């Protein structure tokens, strides 16, 4: 195996294979907008399966996970698991009503390939909920100016985070692939530069939010 690929696998494992509860809660918030009864869901980039476990309260017909990680030991047997390098095509003919791609696209080499893969895996009218670092926050822009890269793509995050894209890139790629017009949302949670224990929301009593004050964004679109 190529040395760089080994390093990326190691970096992915060191990341913990999960995302913040704030991001998970936003995913659940957007899922609640849709009818999920008797529907199928794929967590594309499921990591350690933490998000999948929180989705048990929904009435999905089936839930599957896909990741480079091995199947988590404490995952319910009825949950299907695809162990796969997500830079490649997923080896399945199954189609899904919902796909979640949370904090994953920044770890992969080609965002166009990723969204084409997801598009093929979705049923017609299927829903994609994608989250990623928001590279247009004030903190990220400041890092770009002062340290020559977005904050989530500094040397401390490499080689786990390798693909930095903006909201407009997501919209353009989604349009290229064939998705309906995406909606972009923000977590309204962001830490301040150098003082990562302090959030913009705390110091402003909740007034500062949106693109410039959120560490992550959410895209929702349909096939």
Image (cartoon, rainbow, N blue to C red):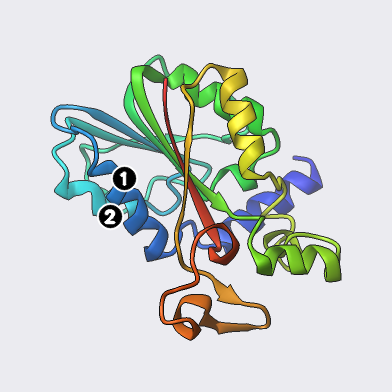
Residue closer to the observer: 160 or 28:
28
Quarter of the picture containing the C terminus is top left
- Asked whether the viewer can see residue 164, the reply is yes
Residue corresponding to mark 1:
30
Q: Position of residue 2 (x, y in %)?
A: 79, 41
Say left or right for 188 vs 154: left
Q: How many marks?
A: 2
* Element on which disc 2 rests: loop
Vertical order, 56 against 88 (above or below):
below
Q: Is 172 situated left or right of 150 in this image? A: left
Answer above or below: position of 81 versus 209. above
Give the vertical position of 199 relative to 19 (above or below): below
Sequence-first disc among 1 and 2: 1
On screen, 2 above or below 118?
Answer: below
Query: Which residue corresponds to mark 2?
Result: 74
Q: Position of residue 181 (x, y in %)?
A: 48, 26
Q: Which is nearer the eye, 49 or 163? A: 163
**Crowding near the residue tagged with mark 2, few <14, some 14–19, many ≥20 C-alpha atoms within 10 Å:** few
- Label 1 to label 2: alpha-carbon separation: 26 Å
On the image, which quarter does residue 35 sit in? top left
Image coordinates for residue 174, horizontal then vertical, percent: 56, 26
Residue under the image location 67 percent in, 78 percent down? 193
């Amino acid at each position: 195996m190529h040395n760089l690929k080994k390093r990326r696998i190691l970096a992915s494992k060191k990341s913990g294979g999960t995302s913040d509860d704030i991001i998970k809660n936003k995913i659940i918030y957007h899922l609640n907008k849709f009818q999920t009864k008797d529907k199928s869901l794929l967590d594309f980039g499921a990591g350690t399966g933490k998000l999948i476990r929180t989705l048990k309260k929904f009435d999905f017909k089936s839930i599957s996970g896909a990741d480079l990680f091995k199947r988590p030991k404490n995952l319910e047997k009825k949950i299907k698991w695809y162990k796969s390098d997500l830079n490649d095509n997923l080896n399945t003919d199954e189609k899904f009503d919902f796909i979640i791609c949370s904090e994953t696209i920044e770890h992969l080499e080609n965002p166009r390939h990723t969204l084409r893969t997801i598009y093929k895996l979705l049923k017609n009218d299927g829903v994609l909920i994608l989250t990623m670092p928001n590279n247009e926050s004030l903190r990220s822009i400041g890092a770009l100016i002062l340290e020559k890269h977005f904050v989530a793509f500094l040397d401390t995050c490499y080689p786990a985070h390798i693909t930095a894209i903006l909201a407009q890139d997501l919209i353009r790629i989604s349009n290229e692939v064939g998705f309906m017009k995406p909606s972009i949302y923000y977590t309204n949670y962001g830490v301040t530069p150098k003082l990562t224990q302090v959030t913009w929301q705390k110091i402003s009593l909740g007034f500062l939010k949106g693109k410039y004050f959120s560490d992550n964004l959410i895209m929702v679109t349909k096939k």
